[in-house]
Image (spheres, helix red, strand yellow):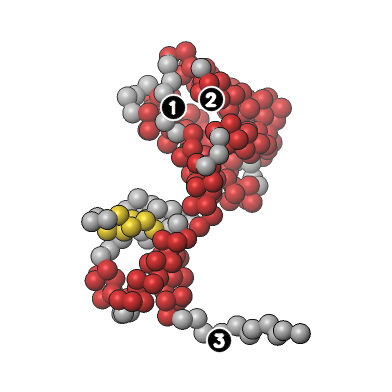
Amino acid sequence: MKRINAPRRTASLSAQLVDSLRSHIEAGGWPVGTRIPSEQSLIEELGVGRSTLREAIGALVHLGLLEPRAGDGTYVRSSSELQSVMVRRASSVERDKVLELRTVLEEYASGAAALRRDETQLRQLRELLADAEAAAAGADPSAATNVDALFHRAVVRASGNDLLVEVYDYLGTALTSSLGGLTWDTAHAEDHARLHRRLVDAIEAQNADEARDAAAAIVRLTRDHETE
């Protein structure tokens, strides 16, 4: 019988550097969208050779955390491998499938939030609801999309399910990336705002069935608006 290879006692320097840089990115040391320091700066700061650094950077590019841009350096693309994978996966399928996934997660989370929310979380939802309505009235669609994403993440956090929160945090960027960019006319914007108010009212009243219905209706509105 073939023997299993025993693990190496110590990781290579480049592997250690990959772990160190990955932890730095996950902790927000280099925020998503920012350019990382130059190669020479990192060599001096970390005390490693050029080939070791390039090997580590290449591994992080392969994992989807970093993105090299010709003539402009290397940028942080994602804060986690799972998030990067989900963004790519969500962008490769029909939006209907992404919307179905969003319905499953948010409908359950909304019902749970109605049963488990506390007053601090309810107050935060009210504040984000006001921010979302203000952003929707502005001229920047991306601002409205970002606030809407924060609102739905807050609903999921109010569910009290730590594992669901963690999964949704990874999927949130994928959902926002895939579903962003919609422009709303006045009628759709009013319906969108009304359904969000209905959702928060249901969570405040601790009406789980109504909260689930409102969450599902929000996703249906998005899907129906896209197909018009």
Q: Where is residue 178 in the image (x, y as percent from the top left)?
A: 49, 37
Please tell me whether mark 1 sits on a helix, a strand or a loop: loop
Q: Quadrant of the N terminus?
A: bottom right
**In front: 148, or 56?**
56
Whether residue 121 appears in this view of the structure is: no
Question: Of the residues shown, which amino acid type is indicated by label 2?
Answer: Thr
**In front: 226, or 198?**
226
Please tell me whether mark 2 sits on a helix, a strand or a loop: helix
Determine the residue positioned at 51% across, 23% down.
Answer: 226
Q: Mark 1 points at which residue?
A: 182
Q: Mark 3 points at which residue?
A: 9
Determine the residue positioned at 42% across, 76% down.
Answer: 14
Mark 1 touches mark 3? (CB < 8 Å)? no
| Alpha carbon separation for disc pair 2 and 1 | 9 Å
Q: Where is residue 93 in the image (x, y as percent from the top left)?
A: 55, 39
Mark 2 touches mark 3? (CB < 8 Å)? no
Q: Which of marks 2 and 1 is nearer the N terminus?
A: 1
Mark 2 touches mark 1? (CB < 8 Å)? yes
Whether residue 92 appears in this view of the structure is: yes
Question: Of the residues shown, which amino acid type is indicated by label 3?
Answer: Arg
Question: Of the residues shown, which amino acid type is indicated by label 1?
Answer: Leu
| Alpha carbon separation for disc pair 2 and 3 | 53 Å
Few, some or many residues within 10 Å of mark 2 (<14, 14–19, 20+): some
Residue 119 horizontal side relative to residue 173, left or right: right
